[in-house]
Amino acid sequence: MLEDYRNKVFNEDVLKVLKYLPDNSLSMVYGDPDYNVGINYAGKNYTQKWNDYINWYIDLTKECMRVLKPDGNLFMMNYPKQNAHLRVKYLDDNAFNVNDYVWVYNTNVGHSAQKFTTAHRSILHATKSKNNAFYKENVAVPYQNPTDKRIMGRIANGHTGRMPYSWFYYDLVKNVSKDKTFHSCQIPLPLVEMLLKSRGVYEKYTAPLGIGWMVNISHHYGPSVDGYEYMKWGTYHRANHTHIGVDRTRNGTGYACQYDPYLADTYDNPKTCPENLLLFFHRMPFSYRLKSGKTILQHIYDTHFEGAEDAEEFIRVFDGLKPLLPERYFDAVSGRLEAQLKNAREWRDVINTYFYRLTAIGDESGRKIYD
Ligand SMILES: C[S@@+](CC[C@H](N)C(=O)[O-])C[C@H]1O[C@@H](n2cnc3c(N)ncnc32)[C@H](O)[C@@H]1O
């Protein structure tokens, strides 16, 4: 039943959505609800009388605790006063353990002659048992003295960084900052679009369909068709003139079986395996037709052509943003985008040529492939 809710966004009242979910079903809940401080979201003001708000906040948290797995973690972010009430009136009596973390929110609004401004938010972390799954090593922060002898010893023993404290500090762009632009949203929209597209574009010309990843060994800039093919690291493509990919299903290496059964079954079947992972989990003929109707070979040609075109488009878009961006950022990023275009074109030509020679099947659109 939980499958109906996986990877979906619901534009509905949060309490209603929570009611759909079974008990003990989520590994983590992170609540960042309205804080009842008079803010309008999409034209709607959620502010209510204090007691009504706290009762609603408690009801919300009760539901969050109900759907949380016994080893899960609940986080509720709010102003310190709202969270103090939630903690004392509900969480302390009902959670196994409660911790209060602080987000240092370096704001310069709300000053008055009589008090300091509230420049922090509270994040309550509640658990249901002593066995909560917590992956602290994954959020280690860089060591501040990496050349210190003791720290070097820790790094040599595999530690990735300092364990975070119970407070987090992220600097905000202030009105007086030299990085502040006149643009109403600090990051111009075309730049946000570029950031969102960027990974997909890189994937198009480096690793379409999960075949990865034909790169120069070590530095990884630029293509090498057999880069890691005969190394123990195993980014193999195993292409011959008819087939490509590695069978990692239960009939092959069994790699897919390591996942949760739902995902293992999904990956095991080429019809349900997400196509961006198809050649990672399956060995397929180049002539296999994807959901788009294209053959695997044509998809590889197309994505390499598109990737290089997209990298070119990024430069055009970024040039148009020059007046909006601090010069030093503009220059640094422009140089990188030029390098990306050079890499993308090289990838397009080398990889497409490789597959053309291997299969002797040309591009359906007749574009230039170097032979
Ligand atoms: C503090 S903001 C969260 C911002 C979000 N975490 C982010 O970083 O973009 C609170 C959000 O909760 C939404 N909201 C308020 N009441 C809600 C309700 N009853 N059900 C679902 N969403 C609600 C508001 O529209 C607003 O977008």
Image: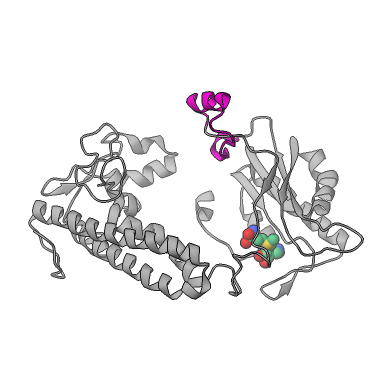
Against 155, residue 13 (above or below) is: below
Q: In this view, does 248 lie to the left or right of 151?
A: left
Give whichever of 367, 324 is nearer the camera.
Answer: 324
Q: Magenta segment: does it hold 193?
A: no
The answer, for residue 3, to whether it is visible in the render is yes
Q: Magenta segment: does it hold 146?
A: yes
Residue 39 horizontal/vertical position (percent): 75, 68
Q: Name the residue located 84 percent from the left edge and 50 percent from the top edge.
A: 85
Give whichever of 123, 143 is nearer the camera.
Answer: 143
- Quadrant of the rendered image holding ligand 1: bottom right
Residue 124 horizontal/vertical position (percent): 73, 45
Quadrant in the rendering for residue 229: top left
Q: In this view, does 51 lie to the left or right of 130?
A: right
Q: How many labels does the image show?
A: 0
Quadrant in the rendering for residue 47: bottom right
Residue 116 horizontal/vertical position (percent): 85, 57
Residue placed furthest toward the right: 114
Q: Name the residue located 57 percent from the left edge and 40 percent from the top edge.
A: 139
Residue 173 horizontal/vertical position (percent): 64, 62
Q: Is residue 198 left or right of residue 210?
A: right
Write down the region rendered in magenta: 134-159
Viewport quadrant of the C terminus? bottom left
Give whichever of 181, 359 is nearer the camera.
Answer: 181
Q: Name the residue located 65 percent from the left edge and 59 percent from the top edge.
A: 172
